[in-house]
Image (cartoon, coloured by chain):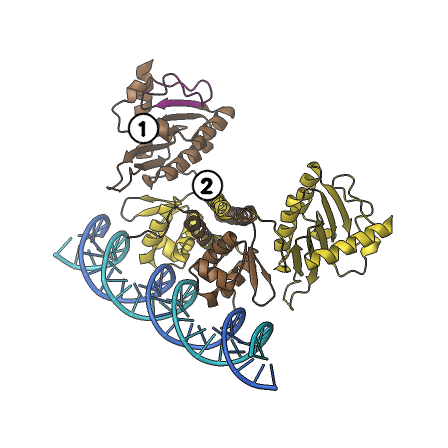
Chain colours: A brown, B yellow, C blue, D cyan
Amino acid sequence: MISNDSDDPESIAVDQLEAFGLSTYAARTFVALTGLGEGTAKDVSALAEVPRTRVYDATAELREHGLVDVQQSTPKRFTAVSAETTGRRFHRQYTRRADALTAALDEIEPVSPTGEQRGVWTVTGREMVSDRVVEFVDDASEEIVLVTLDVLLTDAVVDALRSAADRGVAVRVSGMDFSATDGSDDRLPDGCGFESPRTWSGVPAGRLLMVDGRRTLASVLVDGNGEHPPAPRDETAIWGAGENNSLVVVLRAMFTWLNGDGE
Amino acid sequence: MISNDSDDPESIAVDQLEAFGLSTYAARTFVALTGLGEGTAKDVSALAEVPRTRVYDATAELREHGLVDVQQSTPKRFTAVSAETTGRRFHRQYTRRADALTAALDEIEPVSPTGEQRGVWTVTGREMVSDRVVEFVDDASEEIVLVTLDVLLTDAVVDALRSAADRGVAVRVSGMDFSATDGSDDRLPDGCGFESPRTWSGVPAGRLLMVDGRRTLASVLVDGNGEHPPAPRDETAIWGAGENNSLVVVLRAMFTWLNGDGE
DNA sequence: ACCCACCTTCACTCACATAATCACAATAAG
DNA sequence: CTTATTGTGATTATGTGAGTGAAGGTGGGT
């Protein structure tokens, strides 16, 4: 199958514009106008694969978004705004949307977000797991224990750990692969040394996290199901919350055992 | 007609989520889960107007976006991530989209953006006109002359004027209504006094802009066609570029005449 | 003044995606 | 073993947008 989303700038721009809610005609028309700088309906129809009679609808749609100006002459001439203005406009618009969404959800959200949980929840996707890690770390008030692969220690996670350490939380981080983190990662705050990395060699690679002894998360990297490119391996995690949560109990025991072993 | 987009938090959240590309089932399911904190398919179906058998598809869709975690039990239980995480996630995602779009469009954009233009272009919408003003001001290298209503002097415009003044451009701003800008607006940099505001009283309200004597813009506020709410009046602008552009010639003559009159 | 070419708008069909409903299998509880 | 309930799949309907064609209007050329 011939994938539509090639990697040439035109296709990328069209895809992104469609993601921002524009119709395909509008997106293609805008890209064509960006390349032309200025042009008539015929010009656009020739360059982009847009029926000439529909260029007018497309430009009307673009005009409502403030992306195209029109010259009232015969034939009508159209021009697209600059790339920076376009990017800034969408950025502003969707930042506002995100803020409105957060505000609305905040009103809906019930009061007790961190209650006792019975079961174990599952998350998939590397970025999604990182988000949960950050979320848990941000909620920490006393202690954070994290064992992670180096590649999974993204900037967002490091930032969250830093701010936790700054607010007085005891942060203890250890790497699973004993390649880089010989002593402690240079990006992390001081006093994060936890346990010799070698302790964890042989453990199925991923992350282990415990926050305040009440929230735990465990993840593994699972091979993508025979995908064509090198397939950055997908991550699957489970997490649980609450003092008596089964996963919390298991991991807490595991951590205290290993920690007590070290002393 | 009963408008679907009411102003209660639930409807706002659903609308925003749909704007971010989610299906209505997924949006409604997520909002219901945010209110519940945790629940089964039946719970969601009862609270949100979603068929029970479709809750599973909706949660699958939400899971791919990292917005919902699943508990593998019978019955399955679902939980939504926090409001802040949701907002941050979408903000990140669409910031990246905007950046990718800008980069792609930059590659497409031809080299000479500021050529000689024959005709006169039209723009509608207050925000769209402000964007053009900012765009022109940002491209200024020598001189900026702006006459504007106070309400149209938004922060974005002021910022653009500031940065232009900082880079050595002669900025001269004047207000049309002689209410606030007695001498000079306190938000503006120094040395922007241009002409007594009274000169412009009686001129159809809007803005007049000239940049480097090569680009001009004129706008007026036009009454919204009998809209129900107070209807913030819409703005319509025309602009032209090039030394010999008709609009440029007219406005340049106008400005130099008034300026020479003042001396 | 007429004709012709082109531009512009409008109306229509078709296809696809999503909403919505139903039927059936699987599981757990009594 | 029965039964209610849960999960999965197939199926239909509906609405939106892509694609096409026809008709009206405008300007230029003869």
Secondary element at tag 1? helix
Q: Amino acid at mark 1?
A: Leu
Q: Amino acid at mark 2?
A: Thr
Q: How many marks?
A: 2
Decide if residue B39 is on the left or right side of residue A103.
left
Residue at numbered disc 2: B85
Mark 2 vs mark 1, foreground winner is 2
The chain holding disc 2 is B
Q: Please indicate, yes or no, whether residue B176 appears anywhere in the rendered image.
A: no
Residue at numbered disc 1: A251
Span highlighted in magenta in the image: A171-195
Q: Please indicate, yes or no, whether residue A169 appears anywhere in the rendered image.
A: yes
Q: Quadrant of residue A71?
A: bottom right
Secondary element at tag 2? helix
Classify mark 2: residues with Cα within 10 Å, few (<14), some (14-19) or many (20+): some
Residue at (35%, 37%) from the top-left corner? A126
Towards the viewer: A217 or A40: A40
x and y, in percent, of residue B18 in the image: 45, 55
x and y, in percent, of residue A224 in the image: 27, 40
Tell me if residue B110 comes above or below residue D23 in the rendering.
above
Tell me if residue B235 comes above or below residue A199 in the rendering.
below
Q: Main secondary structure of the magenta part?
A: loop
x and y, in percent, of residue B11 in the image: 49, 56
Q: Mark 2 and mark 1: span between their CA atoms?
A: 25 Å
Residue at (69%, 44%) from the top-left corner? B158
